[in-house]
Amino acid sequence: MIRFTCYVAALILCVSLLFVPNLAEAKPHKTVQSEYQVTGQVRAWEASYSFRIKAGKKELVKGYGTATQGAPEWGDFKELIKVKHKKGQKLTLELFEISQADGSEIHKLTIPLDKIEGKVFHNETFRNVKVSLN
């Protein structure tokens, strides 16, 4: 009787794996928190800039900051950005200025956060931007 029960249990397990293939591959999505330090210089109207971190098209964190000086001078800035995300998820940092004319995003600098080691980023509004994982 015990042998019969084991055969039935094994048969049920095999059939369930055939019809529910993800059951064998199911992995929990672990959420982690990362902390990025962003430094650099910005030449923006009234020294204001905005930032966000995205995972694909989904916005995870957004905010704004103020540099030490406004345009036409270059002002220094420093941000400490914390973000909760799924482990292994590819993240992107976007730095940009908001247009005073129409509120659109201008001069966007996009930084893939998996490729920051030893790199310096820049565009016409942001320069000497360095990102480190704390």
Image (cartoon, grey):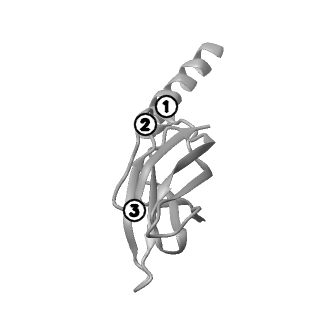
Q: Counting residues from the N terminus, which is met first, the one under dot 2 or under dot 3?
A: 2
Whether tag 1 and tag 2 are in contact, CB under 8 A, the answer is: yes
Left or right of residue 60: residue 104: left
Instruction: Identify the residue under disc 2.
Output: 21
The residue lying at 52 percent from left, 66 percent from top is 50
Nearer to us of marks 3 and 1 is 3
Quarter in which the C terminus is drawn: top right
What residue lies at 60% left-to-right and 53% top-to-bottom? Answer: 79
Label 3 belongs to which residue? 125
Give the percent coordinates (x, y) of residue 84. 61, 49
Query: Hey, which residue is sitting farthest top in the picture?
Result: 3
Q: Find residue 101 and name its label.
A: none
> Image point 54% across, 39% down: which residue?
132
Looking at the rendered structure, the secondary structure element under dot 2 is loop
Which quarter of the rendering shows the N terminus? top right
Q: How many marks?
A: 3
> Identity of the amino acid at label 3?
Thr
Report the residue at 62% width, 44% height from top. Answer: 35
Of 48 and 12, the residue lying toward us: 48
Q: CA distance from mark 2 to mark 3?
A: 50 Å
Q: Which residue is mark 1?
A: 24
Q: Residues within 10 Å of mark 3 (few under 14, many from 20)?
A: some
| Label 3 vs 1, first from the N-terminus | 1
Estimate the x, y position of residue 95 in percent, counting from the top left.
46, 59
Please, what secondary structure does the residue beneath circle 1 have?
A: helix
Q: Amino acid at mark 2?
A: Pro
